[in-house]
Image (spheres, rainbow, N blue to C red):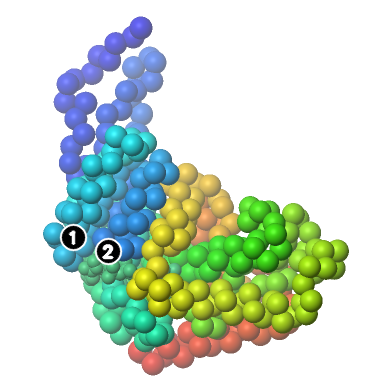
Amino acid sequence: MERYAGKRSDWSNEPGTGKVFNPGTKNGAQGPWSARKVVIVGAGAVGATFAYALAQSGAADDIALIDANPDLAKGQVLDLAHGLAFLPAVRIHVGSLADYRDADAIVITAGAKQQPGESRLALLSRNAAIVKEIARGIADADSPAAIIVTTNPVDILTYIVLKETGRAPGRVIGSGTVLDSFRFRYLLSQKCGVDVHNVHAFILGEHGDSEVAAWSMTHIAGIPIDEYCASCGRCGDREAQRKKIADEVRNSAYHVIDYKGATYFAIGLALTKIVAAVLRNQRSVLPVSTLLQGEYGLNDICLSVPCLVGRAGAERVIEGRLVDSELKALANSAAILKQTLAQIGKG
Ligand code: NAD
């Protein structure tokens, strides 16, 4: 068996460098291997649950948690670190602005909590200032990371972070309607009595009240939903059922918040899916919030449409065929978001 012949110092896992020991190749050459590092800004319910899910996924080697409340960040790190023996190899630590420099992904979950009954758009003024400051810190650090925004209202804040950092459009994405789309798939799977993994469906547009259920892109077992429904016959009034499901998706967050004050498990898993797609260059098709530049007839607005998500972030917008009513609803969603941006002088 070959022995490692490098210096002892090469074994070090220096805090903050994000680098770990590189065993090199069989002939002794050292490759430029570095840890897949994720910085989570905001260690509250969403940030910590995401860290927990990400650590279990094995997609990241290094997870740094930053919070305006340093004790909270320390507490979350300790609690997570106590579970390291049960997890795939991963380093979990309290982060600082220096961690931006060699991060692969920075996930912004920092912000104020949505209060019961409070609309996402009403959170805007409280959260815009917070994410602007974070965006400036990322830009100052000249970070190479893809930025994923989760703080609500996510589409507006994604646009603000994009403009504040001056990055290429695909490098700043919002978690958008990834969560809503998974909620949609769950509800369809329950209604149709089919495994959720065999249901493919997207919610598009704003992550919020104007979101659009894209029925024309919905498939069960590869069969368009209209054809599937025709052969299934489980539902009575199909249109009424569809409206009910779309309304339930739209109101899901309000219901969970009414029951328990916040949503964090499903968004933690949705973020893990997005970030793993970036870290592993998976080119997964996900409805993330991204800047549109003519796609679907829309310009200069961030909202969710299916995108290829990989190392470079949202690498390509996939333009599916929507029916006129869906296109109109998507344009309405964009108009609402633009109006909000104009109200805060960002349009
Ligand atoms: P939370 O209050 O539990 O956590 C937010 C954390 O952000 C707090 O710990 C706070 O100290 C921290 N923070 C505030 N300003 C900061 C700053 N400048 N730098 C670093 N940290 C800062 O809230 P939560 O339940 O975790 O939700 C966080 C955000 O995520 C909210 O805006 C919520 O609406 C949003 N959210 C989005 C989705 C989605 O699908 N996009 C889903 C759920 C929640």
Assess disc 1: are there few (<14), some (14-19) or many (≥20) residues with their C-alpha within 10 Å of its C-alpha.
some
Q: CA distance from mark 1 to mark 2?
A: 8 Å
The residue where tag 1 is placed is 72
161 lies left or right of 314: left
Cβ at disc 1 under 8 Å from ligand 1: yes
Image quarter (top left, top right, bottom left or bottom right) of the C terminus: bottom left
Amino acid type, callout 2:
Gly
Is residue 335 visible in the rendered image? The answer is yes
180 lies left or right of 1: right
Q: Nearer the viewer, residue 43 or 317?
A: 43
Cβ at disc 2 under 8 Å from ligand 1: yes
Residue 20: x and y in percent read 27, 33
Q: Residue drawn at (76%, 55%), measured in percent from left and top?
A: 222
Q: Residue drawn at (47%, 86%), measured in percent from left and top?
A: 338
Q: Residue drawn at (40%, 78%), measured in percent from left and top?
A: 258
Residue 142: x and y in percent read 27, 58
Residue 115 quadrant: bottom left
**Mark 1 and mark 2 residues within 8 Å of each other at the beta carbon:** yes
Relative vertical location of residue 284 with respect to residue 5 in this rendering, above or below? below
Is residue 316 visible in the rendered image? The answer is no
Q: Nearer the viewer, residue 254 or 22?
A: 254
Residue 209: x and y in percent read 51, 83
> Which residue is at the far right?
231
Query: Ligand 1 is in which quadrant of the figure?
Result: bottom left
Residue 86: x and y in percent read 33, 36
**Between discs 1 and 2, the one toward the N terminus:** 2
The residue where tag 2 is placed is 44
Relative vertical location of residue 126 with respect to residue 259 in this rendering, above or below? below
- Is label 1 in a helix, a strand or a loop? helix
